[in-house]
Image (tube, grey):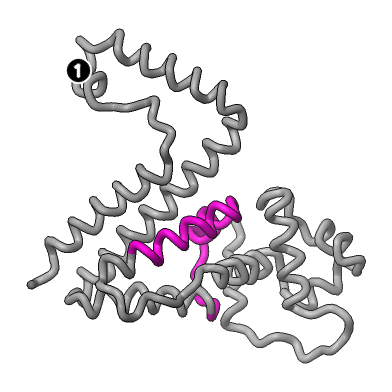
């Protein structure tokens, strides 16, 4: 049977030690290893080698690999800036903040999946969640409707960016990607009788991820706006 996930590191105190290692140094090295190798490439042994330390000494600071991932997630979430949002209209504030989030997830392709699989209770994550909740609350949402709106925006940004990251990791040659898109569109066009709506409206040649993201975000925000009592 699968073992239960250990309690999140945010509910435990940091060990009171002062040798050459620290939780912060270990976390930053873990982020660098995740950026280079992805989640599958992160192990306590490989991280210890990067830090030129003993593997068991890492466990004294972070407890286990899952705790280390929690710390790494919160470390990079700190890269999502918080300034210039408080005084902006709610749609402008959310667009700005969620676009920043997407850019950080693009720099750290492992981030979206990890954000979806663990409680985000680190100080940096909580500060950014507070901002999103506060913006929507000031706009007029509360209770379950507020929570649902936050979830819709969060899942849209995480899902879109994770898909883009995976696509970009598999399509590294722009010319080959353009040819693949052309062939896919032709394949769909030849089946217009079977799939008339797809053939007419699905633009498989569109590689403008930025534009498509903004248009999708506007659509989600339109839905939220319809639920806000003027």
> Among all residues in the image, which is located at the extreme bottom?
16
In this rendering, the answer to whether 140 lies above or below 91 is: below
Helix, strand or loop at mark 1: helix
Tell me which segment is drawn in magenta.
95-123
Quarter occupied by the C terminus = bottom left
- Is there any visible trace of residue 1 in the rendered image? no
When asked about the image quadrant of residue 152, the answer is bottom left
Circle 1 crowding by C-alpha within 10 Å: few under 14, some 14–19, many from 20: few
Residue under pointer 1: 196
Of residues 163 and 139, the one drawn nearer to the viewer in this rendering = 139
**Magenta part, dominant SS:** helix
- Number of dots carrying numbers: 1
Left or right: residue 218 versus residue 61 is left
Of residues 103 and 87, the one drawn nearer to the viewer in this rendering = 87
When asked about the image quadrant of residue 17, the answer is bottom right
| Residue at (90, 68) in percent of width and height | 54
| Residue at (26, 64) in percent of width and height | 149
Of residues 152 and 92, the one drawn nearer to the viewer in this rendering = 92
Q: Position of residue 104 (x, y in %)?
A: 54, 59
Assess whether residue 117 is covered by the magenta stretch.
yes
Left or right: residue 98 versus residue 92 is right
Assess whether residue 131 is covered by the magenta stretch.
no
> Among all residues in the image, which is located at the extreme left?
230
| Residue at (20, 75) in percent of width and height | 139
Q: Position of residue 36 (x, y in %)?
A: 73, 50
- Is there any visible trace of residue 149 in the rendered image? yes
């Amino acid at each position: 049977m699968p073992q239960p996930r250990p309690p999140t590191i945010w509910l435990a105190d940091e060990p009171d030690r002062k040798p050459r290692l620290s939780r912060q140094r270990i976390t930053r090295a873990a982020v660098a290893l995740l950026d280079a190798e992805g989640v599958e490439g992160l192990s306590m042994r490989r991280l210890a080698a990067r830090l030129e330390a003993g593997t068991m000494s890492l466990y004294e600071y972070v407890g286990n690999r899952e705790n280390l991932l929690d710390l790494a997630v919160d470390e990079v979430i700190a890269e999502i800036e918080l300034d210039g949002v408080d005084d902006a209209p709610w749609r402008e504030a959310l667009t700005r903040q969620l676009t920043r989030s997407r850019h950080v997830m693009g720099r750290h392709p492992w981030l979206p999946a990890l954000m979806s699989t663990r409680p985000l209770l680190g100080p940096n994550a909580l500060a950014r969640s507070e901002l999103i909740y506060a913006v929507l609350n000031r706009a007029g949402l509360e209770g379950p409707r507020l929570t649902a709106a936050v979830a819709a925006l969060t899942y849209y940004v995480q899902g879109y960016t994770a898909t883009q990251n995976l696509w970009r990791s598999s399509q590294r040659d722009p010319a080959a990607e353009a040819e693949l898109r052309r062939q896919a569109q032709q394949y769909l066009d030849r089946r217009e009788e079977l799939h008339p709506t797809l053939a007419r409206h699905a633009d498989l040649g569109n590689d403008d991820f930025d534009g498509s993201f903004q248009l999708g975000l506007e659509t989600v925000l339109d839905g939220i706006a319809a639920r806000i009592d003027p």
